[in-house]
Image: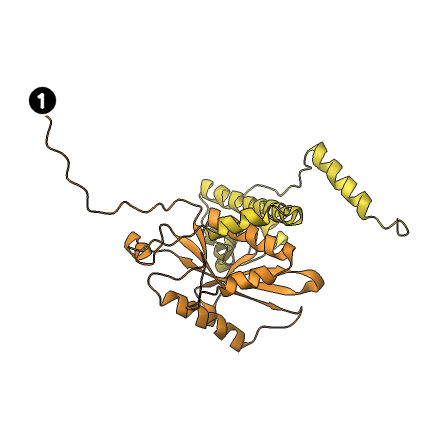
């Protein structure tokens, strides 16, 4: 029985990650994706924990049940923040922005400083 | 050892496939060996290529039906039902789309396809200026590639 070599993606990624610009873009994208995924999965886990069906959740926030189903199964891209906030509220939770570590903040400030247009600043 | 029974007969059933994430990521190849998806990614700006890679890895790590891909992975509908697309914006708001299929099924089905685990199959990609739409012919071209890929057992993928 033929067994395909499926390692190309891993090898290509490893090769590309040697490029610092690629690595930075990959890591930044991965971090952003992970944050979004975590928010949606946490809300879905909270929904399950509280015994709220998707249909009931949709009713609570006056949305079409299919929009909730599509959201939790990644059938619809780019979840709206307003929808996320409404779901959180309906589940007795809230969406927060939490500052990251001081070291991370320093990197952001340094990057902002190097990008700043001296005339506009 | 007394009481030891005879040597166990060799099992003939294949071992069950490993279905745990991450799934594999494969690049569909045409009969001439060229992979349109890989060619597309190689021609993308580096940052866009990196972002496609990050989305693919995220989805492979938490495959459907879990929410995954940061909202950039989307199931398609209508004539493109069964396909998934990754939608990204590049420099100058140029739009980049990567079209994928899910390879899942019974162990026997996956084995017949040459896969040792479920997979995301990258079929091809398209790019377009901002505020323009892909044509029916564009999508038909994607489906033609996808149909050719699905018709092959085992699958033909870039290696």
- Image quadrant where one finds the N terminus of chain A: bottom left
- Residue lying farthest right? A119
Q: Give residue B156's position: percent from left, percent from top.
A: 39, 62
Q: Note the chain letter of the orange one.
A: B
Task: Please name the residue that numbered disc 1 is placed on.
Answer: B2
Q: Nearer the viewer, residue A28 or B46?
A: B46
Residue drawn at (64%, 59%) of the image: B45
Q: Give residue B39's position: percent from left, percent from top.
A: 54, 63
Colour of chain A in the rendered structure image: yellow
Q: Give residue A27's position: percent from left, percent from top.
A: 61, 45
Horizontal side, residue B154 vs residue B35: left or right: left
Q: Nearer the viewer, residue B142 or A78?
A: B142
Question: In which quadrant of the rendered view does residue B157 lie?
Answer: bottom left
Please tell me whether mark 1 sits on a helix, a strand or a loop. Answer: loop
Residue drawn at (82%, 43%) of the image: A113
Question: In which quadrant of the rendered view does residue B26 lie?
Answer: bottom left
The chain letter for the residue carrying disc 1 is B
- Residue lying farthest top? B2
Q: Is residue A28 visible?
A: yes
Residue drawn at (34%, 61%) of the image: B154
């Amino acid at each position: 029985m033929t067994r395909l070599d499926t390692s190309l993606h891993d090898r290509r990624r490893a090769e590309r990650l040697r490029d610092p610009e690629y690595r930075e873009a990959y890591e930044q994208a991965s971090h952003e994706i992970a944050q979004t995924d975590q928010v949606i999965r946490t809300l879905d886990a909270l929904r399950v924990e509280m015994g709220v069906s998707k249909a009931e959740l949709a009713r609570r926030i006056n949305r079409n049940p299919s929009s909730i189903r599509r959201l939790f199964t990644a059938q619809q891209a780019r979840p709206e923040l307003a929808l996320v906030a409404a779901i959180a509220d309906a589940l007795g939770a809230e969406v927060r922005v939490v500052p990251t570590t001081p070291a991370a903040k320093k990197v952001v400030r340094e990057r902002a400083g190097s990008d700043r247009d001296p005339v506009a600043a | 050892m007394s009481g030891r029974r005879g040597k166990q007969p060799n099992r003939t059933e294949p071992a069950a496939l490993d279905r745990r994430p991450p799934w594999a990521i494969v690049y569909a190849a045409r009969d001439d060996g060229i992979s349109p998806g890989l060619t597309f990614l190689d021609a993308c700006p580096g940052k866009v290529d990196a972002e496609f890679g990050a989305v693919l890895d995220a989805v492979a790590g938490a495959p459907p039906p879990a929410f995954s891909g940061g909202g950039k992975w989307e199931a398609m509908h209508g004539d493109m039902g069964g396909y998934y697309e990754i939608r990204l914006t590049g420099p100058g708001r140029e739009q980049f789309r990567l079209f994928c299929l899910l390879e899942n099924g019974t162990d026997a089905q996956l084995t017949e396809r040459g896969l040792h685990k479920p997979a995301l199959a990258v079929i091809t990609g398209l790019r377009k200026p901002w505020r323009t739409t892909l044509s029916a012919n564009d999508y038909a071209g994607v489906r033609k590639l996808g149909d050719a890929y699905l018709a092959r057992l085992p699958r033909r993928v870039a290696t």
